[in-house]
Image (cartoon, helix red, strand yellow):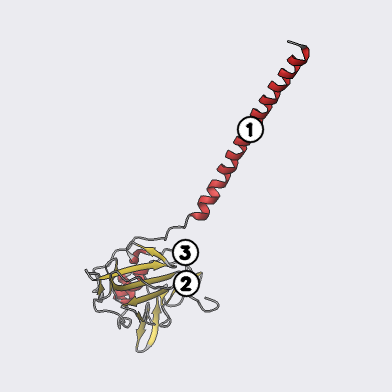
Amino acid sequence: MSPLAAHTRQVGGNARRTVVAFAAILVAASSLVVSAASPLGASAAHKPSIATVPFDTSSRVSLAQPSPPRPSPADARPYIAAAKLSVLSREQLEVHYHAHVDIIANRNQITVPAGIGFVISNGTATGITVLHTHDPSGILHIESASNEAFSLGQAFTEWGVALNANQVGGFKTDRAHVLRTYVNGRRFTGDPATIRLEPHLEIALWYGPSGTKPRVPKSYSFPEGL
């Protein structure tokens, strides 16, 4: 073999090795990019789960079976105790946020009354709990001295209305009717009483004929400052 041919063969071999090595670098780099990007992509696509807390319906009070609307109980104390809450002499504002609940039954909007969580004596409020309503807007006020977990079931127990996966008050599931729960427009398939209340949640309880597509709000326009 001539010196020129030998030199050419050597150069060609070096070139091939260089190309192979460069390709390996590109593959390694791309795998690093994919590995670095994957958690971000998965995180962006993943929706956080709807938070829940344990809730047991108390047997110490009889929760309403008739269909809401229903006013707040005349004697709130046993319902407050059943919700495992305490009567306070004033509002606690160290932790202060709001959630909203809609009840839609057979296409009718059901009113969530004012005064849930208040103790009323001779027409005057003499006590309040950390979880209450000021008006019939459906806004739940959470005002606590500490950052504890509160559930939708506690609010309904204070109200004196039964709530579970199969009923809201007297609206009960059967072969012809279903109860669907949505949180910020997302379907929740568990017991709605266990939903943990968090700032600006929109919770919708929809009851109606099976086979009907529920139409529920995905958010609530809270007044400025809430």
**Residue 84 visible to an observer of this rendering:** no
Most distant residue in the left direction = 175
Of pointers 3 and 2, the one earlier in the residue sequence: 3
Residue 53 as seen in the image, left or right of residue 35: left
Secondary element type, mark 1: helix
Along the viewing direction, whichever of 107 and 198 lies nearer the viewer: 107
Of pointers 1 and 2, the one earlier in the residue sequence: 1
Q: Position of residue 205 (x, y in %)?
A: 35, 72
Along the viewing direction, whichever of 165 and 57 lies nearer the viewer: 165
Secondary element type, mark 2: loop
List the residue tagged with mark 3: 147
Of pointers 1 and 3, the one earlier in the residue sequence: 1
Q: Position of residue 166 (x, y in %)?
A: 27, 67
Rounded to the nearest angstrom, the CA distance separating label 1 from label 3 is 55 Å
Q: Residues within 10 Å of mark 3 (few under 14, many from 20)?
A: few
Rounded to the nearest angstrom, the CA distance separating label 3 from label 2 is 23 Å
List the residue tagged with mark 2: 219
Q: Is residue 190 above or below residue 68?
A: above
The three-letter amino acid code for the residue at tag 2 is Ser
**Residue 139 sits in quarter:** bottom left
Secondary element type, mark 3: loop
**C-beta proximity under 8 Å, tags 1 and 2:** no
Rounded to the nearest angstrom, the CA distance separating label 1 from label 2 is 51 Å
Q: Is residue 172 above or below residue 28?
A: below
List the residue tagged with mark 1: 23
Q: Residues within 10 Å of mark 1 (few under 14, many from 20)?
A: few
The three-letter amino acid code for the residue at tag 1 is Ala
Most distant residue in the right direction = 4
Q: Position of residue 96 (x, y in %)?
A: 49, 71
Q: Is residue 46 above or below residue 5?
A: below
Q: Position of residue 17 (x, y in %)?
A: 66, 24
